Amino acid sequence: MSNKAPMRPVNSMILTTLFLLCLGWNSSAQKKVQYLQYEDLKPYHLGFLIGLHSQDLIIDHTGTPDEAGHRWYASVPAYTPGFSVGVIGDLRLLDYLSLRMTPSIHFGSKDVSLRSDETASIATTHSVRSNYITVPLSLRYRGARSGNHRPYLLGGISAGLDMGRDQHNPILLRPINTYLELGIGCDFYLPYFRLVPELKLSLGMGDVFVHNRSDQDKDVYKKYTQAIDRITSRLIVFSLQFE
């Protein structure tokens, strides 16, 4: 026969009450505070961005052989990260749509290698430095806010000016270009500001290769100008935006 006394109803009520209180405290602790609740209602706001980018070149070739009958091909063998900095201006059009301008400077370079189809050919590599000043104008479409984050897509165009050109480089690029821009990101609402990570692709829409040069008689320049038919530039930018 068991000598344990049955649990009293009062003790059961106390344990049940404590259990319910713990559940209530747990649920309130897990409930997130929604920061900057009225931030999206502002007609406009400003900010700044910092980030990293990679410069790339899309190269089309002529296929024209040289005097020895060999064809030359250029490529970008590796990517070197560059630094980006800019300012942000955002104009609210609708609840889900805004017009955005982000003037930025991108400091960086890329290596371009030239190699012939000859079996024992050795690649010749030159560094092409470019400091782009870009003025993108984009439409940003944002999804519904969930807690303290809100994803978005953007698309637009950009005008770019290359301030880092070397006039004596075998590959000379035009200073002015236009870009088509596509991006994705997410607003993270913090107590005092929004932190916005963004990944953006800028696709050059024009041929930036300078074909006719006054110094074309030099052999090192002629190899590139004879081999390359068209070059378009491309930027991949990852930025952290503070708004």
Image (cartoon, rainbow, N blue to C red):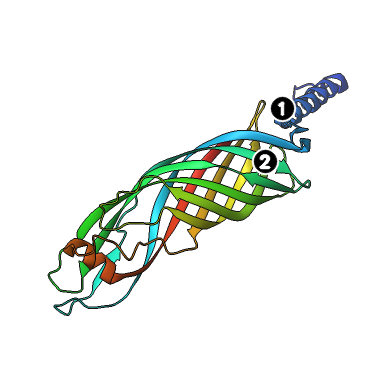
Residue drawn 78% across and 47% down?
A: 94
Q: Nearer the viewer, residue 100 or 66?
A: 66
Find disc 1 in the rendering and name its residue.
29
Q: Nearer the viewer, residue 80 or 212?
A: 212
- On residue 20, the disc is none
Amino acid type at image mark 1: Ala
Residue drawn 17% across and 80% down?
A: 69
Residue 119 image point, x, y percent: 14, 73
Quadrant in the rendering for residue 78 = bottom left
Answer with left or right where residue 92 lies relative to residue 85: right
Answer with left or right where residue 129 lies relative to residue 20: left
Q: Is residue 132 visible to us here?
A: yes
Residue drawn 32% across and 59% down?
A: 76
Answer with left or right where residue 35 lies relative to residue 83: right
Answer with left or right where residue 229 lies relative to residue 218: right
Quadrant in the rendering for residue 31 = top right
- The nearer-to-camera label among 2 and 1 is 2
Residue 61 image point, x, y percent: 33, 72
Residue 64 image point, x, y percent: 26, 78
Task: Give the farthest residue toward the bottom.
Answer: 69
Q: Is residue 1 visible to us here?
A: no
Q: Nearer the viewer, residue 11 or 38?
A: 38
Residue 200 image point, x, y percent: 53, 51
Find disc 2 in the rendering and name its residue.
90
Q: Quadrant of the C terminus?
A: top right
Task: Give the farthest residue toward the right.
Answer: 9
Quadrant in the rendering for residue 7 = top right
